[in-house]
Amino acid sequence: MKGFYRLNDKFVNKNRQMRTLYCSVLIFLFFSGYVLSQNQPTNPVGLRKIPAIDVKTTDNKTFNTANISNGGKPIIICFWATWCKPCINELSTIADVYPEWQEETGVKLIAISIDDSKTSGGVGPLVNGKNWDYEIYLDINSDFKRAMNVNMIPHSFIINGKNEIVWQHTTYSQGSEMEMINIIRKVAKGDTIPAEKN
């Protein structure tokens, strides 16, 4: 029996050592992962470029989104539709301050309508009626919308001078344009944009 207990004690000791080693490795991996994650870029969208997708102008000409540019200055891309009241509220609110934003930061706003073939005919009249001074494009088949991972509108993106997506936001509430202009000011200065909670 003594031999059995000696073998059993060795087994228990080995098992205990393995558990201790296993726990130590897990703790090490956890803290290593945490430290590494602190050194990663904080931008949740990872500074990806604008995808190259064909959209239409309001006069039915093809435009490739790879040609979106603003001479190294910030760009706002807003996805909207004529049937989306919060979208129209956001674009109308920005229209009131857009000349000042342009003067201060050089920003350009590009409004991408996701109206389908049934409702896209109302885009031009609505834009003219609202007197919006934006570049307007039609994404009738939602190809650009899908490429930008837009699920709900309004959905706005801020693009830096290298055509990289540095910030995005969904929905609209009164006053949220102030958050947008603050981000645009930082982008215009070349500052790093902190992660957003959307």
Image: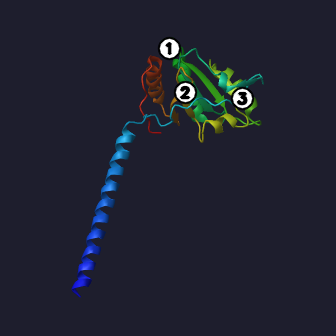
- Tell me the residue at 64%/31% (across/down): 51
Between the residue at mark 1 and the residue at mark 2, the CA separation in whole angstroms equals: 24 Å
Q: In which quarter of the image is residue 64?
A: top right
Of discs 3 and 1, which sits in the foreground? 3
- Amino acid type of the residue that numbered disc 3 sits on in the rendered structure: Val
Q: Nearer the viewer, residue 185 or 26?
A: 26
Q: Where is residue 191 in the image (x, y as percent from the top left)?
A: 42, 22
Label 3 sits on residue: 55
- Tell me the residue at 38%/36% (across/down): 39
Q: Position of residue 40 (x, y in %)?
A: 42, 36
As helix, strand or loop, the secondary structure at mark 1 comes to helix
- Amino acid type of the residue that numbered disc 2 sits on in the rendered structure: Glu
| Residue 180 visible in image | yes
Neighbours of disc 2 within 10 Å: few (<14), some (14-19), many (20+): some
As helix, strand or loop, the secondary structure at mark 3 comes to strand
Q: In which quarter of the image is residue 155?
A: top right
**Farthest left residue?**
2
For this view, does 182 lie left or right of residue 170?
left
Between the residue at mark 3 and the residue at mark 1, the CA separation in whole angstroms equals: 28 Å
- Amino acid type of the residue that numbered disc 1 sits on in the rendered structure: Glu
Q: Position of residue 80 (x, y in %)?
A: 62, 32
Label 1 sits on residue: 100
Q: Position of residue 19 (x, y in %)?
A: 31, 65
